[in-house]
Image (cartoon, rainbow, N blue to C red):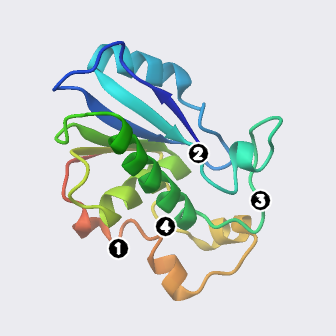
């Protein structure tokens, strides 16, 4: 499930930006920014409702997250699949693809750029988690193996990123 805001008209310079919400947030977290960016920057704006949080967790309020929580692996897959689906539906300039997120969404944006290194032209991560430390692992309600931690370690995988990164 995704929230999409498209410019009134699309053309050869129309781009796409994916918005990844924070831990326990939902696809509408960046609604105002998405409307602004669609009009101001000629971008199709897509916000994924990824599994285990938001409306998937609480269909009434759209807030919170399951425990145990996967903490950015399944969620990255959901976001990349949403980008793929959006690209199939909207003709956009492939040189204008961007990933944005804050908090866990920033973690997801970094992991998206690392796992799909030639996809995005810019990644913006605000107050991003960069790895799952012991306190965050406790928050997830589960123990993770070293391999599970490694695939969530944005610092370790940073050399895979093939686009500029803005850290806020």
Mark 1 to mark 3 CA distance (whole Å): 27 Å
Question: In this view of the protein, can residue 167 be seen by the observer?
Answer: no
Of the numbered discs 2 and 1, the one sitting upstream in the chain is 2
Of the numbered discs 3 and 2, the one sitting upstream in the chain is 2
Q: At which x and y percent is residue 64?
A: 76, 47
Of the numbered discs 1 and 3, the one sitting upstream in the chain is 3
Labels 2 and 1 touching (C-beta < 8 A): no
| Mark nearer the viewer, 4 or 3 | 3
At horizontal 70% and vertical 65% (from top left) the residue drawn is 69
Q: At which x and y percent is residue 116?
A: 30, 61
Please tell me whether residue 56 is drawn above or below residue 35 in the rendered image.
below
Crowding near pointer 3: few (<14 within 10 Å), some, many (20+)?
some
| Mark nearer the viewer, 1 or 3 | 3
Of the numbered discs 4 and 1, the one sitting upstream in the chain is 4
Label 3 element class: loop
Mark 4 to mark 3 CA distance (whole Å): 19 Å
The residue where tag 3 is placed is 66
Label 2 element class: loop
The residue where tag 4 is placed is 131
Mark 4 to mark 2 CA distance (whole Å): 15 Å
Labels 4 and 1 touching (C-beta < 8 A): yes
């Amino acid at each position: 499930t995704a929230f999409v805001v498209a410019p009134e008209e699309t053309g050869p310079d129309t781009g796409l930006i994916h918005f990844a919400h924070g831990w326990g947030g939902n696809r509408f977290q960046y609604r105002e920014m998405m409307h602004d960016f669609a009009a101001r920057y000629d971008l199709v704006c897509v916000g994924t409702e990824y599994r285990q949080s938001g409306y998937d967790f609480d269909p009434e309020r759209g807030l919170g997250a399951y425990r145990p929580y996967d903490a950015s692996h399944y969620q990255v897959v959901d976001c990349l699949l949403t980008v793929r689906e959006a690209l199939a539906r909207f003709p956009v300039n492939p040189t204008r693809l961007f990933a944005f997120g804050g908090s866990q969404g920033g973690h997801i944006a970094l992991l998206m750029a690392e796992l799909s290194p030639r996809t995005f032209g810019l990644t913006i991560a605000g107050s991003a988690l960069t790895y799952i430390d012991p306190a965050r692992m406790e928050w997830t309600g589960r123990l993770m193996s070293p391999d599970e931690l490694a695939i969530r370690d944005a610092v370790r995988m940073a050399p895979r990123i093939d686009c500029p990164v803005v850290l806020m």
